[in-house]
């Protein structure tokens, strides 16, 4: 099996996977790729383990360590919220990769937005962790991706799109700095949607804690706002009712939505040169943002 490992993707490939598996002591035989977006995600079928690999950078090292520490702490709390990682020394760092290992939990039927709202209520009722957690840094990953793209011999973005994204990011960040949010700041997941949930021992649990931080709690409610993925309005209403707060009643919801939508472009910018589907989706998203076309439907590319 061969997977793209060009420098432009900045995602580790199979050599790094095999090296991290040797160190962690797990069997990668018959490995199956699950996703290549912000991480390279693989299923180890003989172990029923999911391996998540990111490029070895200082930011990714800190993010992986925070993810492991946070999810292990959450496993000690009375109400279950997060799928804990596999036991053992993590993250594993070698061959240009930062790897973490997680139990594989097959999900046969998708969770509802109400299931997600229940988890958000549990999470937001917890105290802040008794160890340092990063503060929310909006659009940091987008800026990283724009720098990577600018350094390429053949950038994925046209110069006009690059400039527009930088200007738009500056405008949103200036507005964010001057905005206060009614729910206040606290410990948040940072990427809460039903694709980041798995079923474990009768409970829905959250996975993918890469974006966890101390930030506006409203960040975890953005699945329930009108966006380019066009979730059914009835599902969004049920989510807000189950959570117990209507984010649409506060003016700042559009700011957080706009920041999150712009942030989502980062992984597509990284992948565009080696993944045609990512390039197509990237340019579709930029066109809709520049045109202010809220009717355009976006799609997640695995």
Image (tube, rainbow, N blue to C red):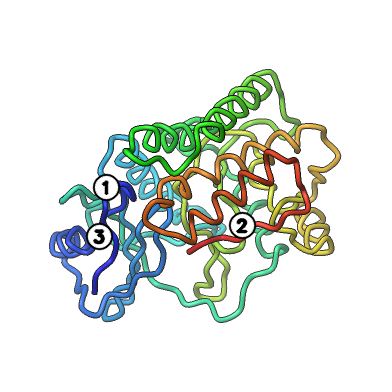
The dot on residue 284 is none
> Disc 3 versus disc 2: distance between alpha carbons?
27 Å
Q: Residue at left 26%, top 53%?
A: 6
Q: Is residue 59 left or right of residue 56?
A: right
Q: Is residue 218 visible?
A: no
Residue 289 in the image, given as x and y percentages of width and height: 68, 42
- In this rendered view, identify the residue nearer to me: 199 or 38: 38
Instruction: Quickly name the residue at label 3.
Output: 13
**Residue 5 on image: x %, y %:** 26, 57
Q: Nearer the viewer, residue 142 or 195?
A: 142
- Closer to the chain start, of discs 1 and 2, is 1
Q: Is residue 6 visible?
A: yes
- Tell me if residue 35 comes above or below residue 251 in the rendering: below
Q: Earlier in the sequence, mark 3 or mark 1?
A: 1
The 10 Å Cα crowd at callout 3, few under 14, some 14 to 19, many 20 or more, is: many
The image position of residue 183, as x and y in percent, is: 72, 35
Task: Answer with left or right where residue 261 lies relative to residue 276.
Answer: right
Seen at 35% across and 67% down, the residue is 50
C-alpha distance separating marks 3 and 1:
11 Å
Q: Are marks 3 and 1 in contact (CB under 8 Å)?
A: no
Residue 193 - label: 2
Q: Nearer the viewer, mark 1 or mark 2?
A: 1
Query: CA separation, marks 1 and 2?
Result: 30 Å
Considering the numbered disc 1 on the image, is that residue within a helix, a strand or a loop?
A: loop
Quadrant in which the N terminus is drawn: bottom left
**First-in-chain label (3 vs 2):** 3
**The quadrant where residue 298 appears:** bottom right
Considering the numbered disc 2 on the image, is that residue within a helix, a strand or a loop? Answer: loop
Quadrant in the picture for residue 18: bottom left
Q: Identify which residue, 134 or 284, lies in the foreground.
A: 284
């Amino acid at each position: 099996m061969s997977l793209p490992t060009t420098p432009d993707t900045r995602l580790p490939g199979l050599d790094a996977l095999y090296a991290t598996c040797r160190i962690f002591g797990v069997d990668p035989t018959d490995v199956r790729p699950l996703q290549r977006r912000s991480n390279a995600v693989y299923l180890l079928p003989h172990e029923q383990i999911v391996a998540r690999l990111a490029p070895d950078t200082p930011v990714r090292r800190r993010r992986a360590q925070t993810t492991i520490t946070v999810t292990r702490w959450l496993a000690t709390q009375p109400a279950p919220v997060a799928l804990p990682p596999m036991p053992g020394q993590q993250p594993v760092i070698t061959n240009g990769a930062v790897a973490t290992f997680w139990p594989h939990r097959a999900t046969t039927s998708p969770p509802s937005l109400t299931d997600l709202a229940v988890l958000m209520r549990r999470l937001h009722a917890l105290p802040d962790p008794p160890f340092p957690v990063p503060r929310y840094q909006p659009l940091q990953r987008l800026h990283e991706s724009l720098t990577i793209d600018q350094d390429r011999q053949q950038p994925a973005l046209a110069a006009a799109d690059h400039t527009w994204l930088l200007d738009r990011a500056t405008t949103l960040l200036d507005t964010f700095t001057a905005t206060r949010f009614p729910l206040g700041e606290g410990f948040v997941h940072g990427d809460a949607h039903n694709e980041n949930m798995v079923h474990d021992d009768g409970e829905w649990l959250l996975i993918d804690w890469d974006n966890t931080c101390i930030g506006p709690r409203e960040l975890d409610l953005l699945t329930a706002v009108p966006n380019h993925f066009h979730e059914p309005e009835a599902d969004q209403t049920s989510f807000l009712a189950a959570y117990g707060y209507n984010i649409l009643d506060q003016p700042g919801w559009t700011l957080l939505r706009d920041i999150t939508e712009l942030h989502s472009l980062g992984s597509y910018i990284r992948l565009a040169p080696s993944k045609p589907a990512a390039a197509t989706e990237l340019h579709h998203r930029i066109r809709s943002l520049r045109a202010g076309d809220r009717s355009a439907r976006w799609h997640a590319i695995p």
